[in-house]
Image: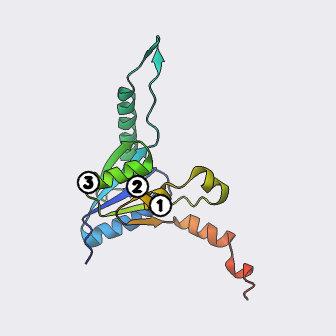
Amino acid sequence: MIFLRKILITTDMSEFSLAAMEYAASLGLLYAARLYLLHVLEHAPAGTKRYGREVDSRAQQQRAEERAARELEDFVMNKVGSDVRLVPVVRSGSPPEAIKQFTEEEGIDLIVMATHGRTGLRHILMGSVAEKVVRISNIPVLTVKPRPLREAILENEDIESELHLP
C-alpha cells in the first residue's frame, strides 16, 4: 500500500503551475499529507564589482531569496487561497538539482509539477525542467499538463483529421 506523507509541488509562479496544485491538493486531502510548495531561483545573483572589489554575492543571494519568498507568499494568497495548507520554500540553483536535493532532505514521497508544453525547437533549446526531474528523481513524479494547454493541443493537433477518420 502506498502512503504519501509529504508531497512536493514545484512552481515558477505562473498560471501553468496551478494545474499541479489542483492534483497535489486532492492527493494531500486523500492521504492527509503535508504539502510543500517549492520555488527555485534559477540563477543566483552573481557578485558585482564595486571600486575594484567584489561585493558579497551571498548577501545578494539572500536578498533575492527573501524577495522571492515574499513573492511566493503573495502568489499563494492571490492564486491558491487559504483553503490549501502549504509550506512555502525558496531555494537557489539549478531547478532539477534543487528539487532533487529538497526531496532528499525532507523525505518527500511524491513530486507534482506542471509542464509548460514546449515542443519542437523551443523544447530542444530550452529543455524541460519536468523532464530532467523525472530522469534524476529517485521518487515518483506526477507531471500535469495544464487544461488550457491540453485544449490547445487537442485543437491544433486534430488526430482524427490526420488519420482521415469520419
The three-letter code of the residue at mark 2 reads Thr
* Local crowd size for mark 2, using a 10 Å CA cut-off: few (<14), some (14–19), many (≥20): many
Q: Secondary structure at mark 1?
A: strand
Give the distance between the C-alpha atoms of the residues marked 3 and 2, in whole angstroms.
14 Å
Asked which quadrant contains residue 2, the reply is bottom left
Residue at 34%, 69% (x, y): give it.
26
Q: Secondary structure at mark 3?
A: helix
In the rendered structure, the answer to whether residue 4 lies left or right of residue 12 reads left
Identify the residue position indicated by label 2 in the image: 10
The dot on residue 114 is 1
Asked which quadrant contains residue 133, the reply is bottom left
In the rendered structure, the answer to whether residue 37 lies left or right of residue 148 reads left
Give the mark nearest the N terminus, 2 or 1: 2
Give yes or no for contact between labels 2 and 1 (Cβ–Cβ under 8 Å): yes
The three-letter code of the residue at mark 3 reads Glu
Give the distance between the C-alpha atoms of the residues marked 1 and 3, in whole angstroms.
21 Å
Give residue 4's position: percent from left, percent from top: 27, 68
The three-letter code of the residue at mark 1 reads Ala
